Amino acid sequence: METDGGIININIDPGAIAQAVVDGLVNAAVALFRPTPANFVQWLWDGIVGILTAASSYNVMAHIPTEWTSNYGQVQDLYFAMLLPEIAITTIVLAIQGYRVMQGKIDIWDAVVRTGFFIIVGHTLLFWSVLIFNAVNAMADFILRVPFNISQQRLSPDLILAGILIVCGVFAILTWVKGAVGVIFLAALLVSGPFLLPLSALPIFEGLGKWWAEEFTTWSLRPVMVALVLRLGLGIGTEGGVLQLLFALVAFWLAWTMDSRIRRFSVGAWGSVSQMGLLAKAGKAAAGAFSGNPAAAAAAAAA
């Protein structure tokens, strides 16, 4: 504003006004988060770490609660209540395989190994699954119980760190929800396994064994992989740098989508029907060796 002979001239600078408005909005946004950033960031951090390291039955993010799966009363009751239908299906499968052997449509060793494997695995599922779940939980707990050693200096009142932890918390909730779905799905696989696995010995139901093994492997290994990526994400992400924070976001996103990624590599797992041919060849070779016919053993191994 200038005065020229009693006349007041007002000069308006639009650029300066726009800059002042932008600065005001930025300062207001920062002031909105900065009054309680230290407590807020610490609360977020403690909450995320507490969820990951919880040992209760509600920790389904990086844990398989056996009290809701293999040791769950209703799962066990349903498993044993289906014993008679399971025996009936197994008997039918054995009869069909025997008929196929007599018709020359399948080798006897292939029939014995394939059928015996799936029958044994299916009917002992509730017992050996406990061992797998306990081993998975032990590995996941070991990974998550490694001290984070995050100092208060790294949990400084930083708007970016608070925002990144909010996004990580959202992904943690989504990962927990998917873990709960996985626990329910594992319980369903435990009950259906004694039916699906013996049936998958037959060529027409061959895909059932592959699907069951793929899903069981995916949801059983998921807690360990989730624990690993989240431990690395929190450990590196709270260092405070831009790349470290980006790594934390990627880690939580990977934890949320971990099941689909494991599923891609679980084809050909221990329950894959395609592996039964190798066991059948081994059985033929062993039978030829014990029969004192080295030529038969060599031919069976080369077949």
Image (cartoon, rainbow, N blue to C red):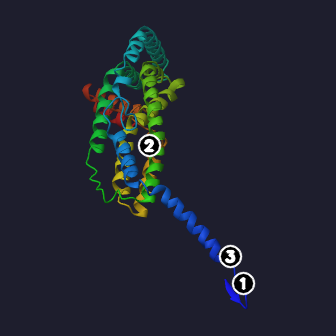
Calculate the distance from the C-alpha at mark 1 to the C-alpha at mark 2: 62 Å
Q: Could you tell me which residue is drawn at 36 percent across and 56 percent down?
A: 238
Choose the circle earlier in sequence order: 1 or 2: 1
In percent of width and height, residue 168 lies at 45, 48
Q: Could you tell me which residue is drawn at 40 percent across and 39 percent down?
A: 222
Tag shown at residue 14? 3
| Residue occupied by mark 1 | 8
> Left of 6 or right of it: where is 273?
left
Q: Are marks 1 and 2 in contact (CB under 8 Å)?
A: no
Q: Amino acid at mark 1?
A: Ile
In percent of width and height, residue 97 lies at 46, 18
Q: Secondary structure at mark 1?
A: strand
Q: For the view shown, which residue lies furthest in the top direction? A: 84
Tag shown at residue 172? 2
Q: Is residue 83 above or below residue 228?
A: above
Between 194 and 272, which is closer to the camera in this rendering?
194
Q: Could you tell me which residue is drawn at 39 percent across and 63 percent down?
A: 241
Calculate the distance from the C-alpha at mark 3 to the C-alpha at mark 2: 46 Å
Mark in the foreground, 1 or 2? 1
Q: Is residue 243 above or below residue 173?
A: below
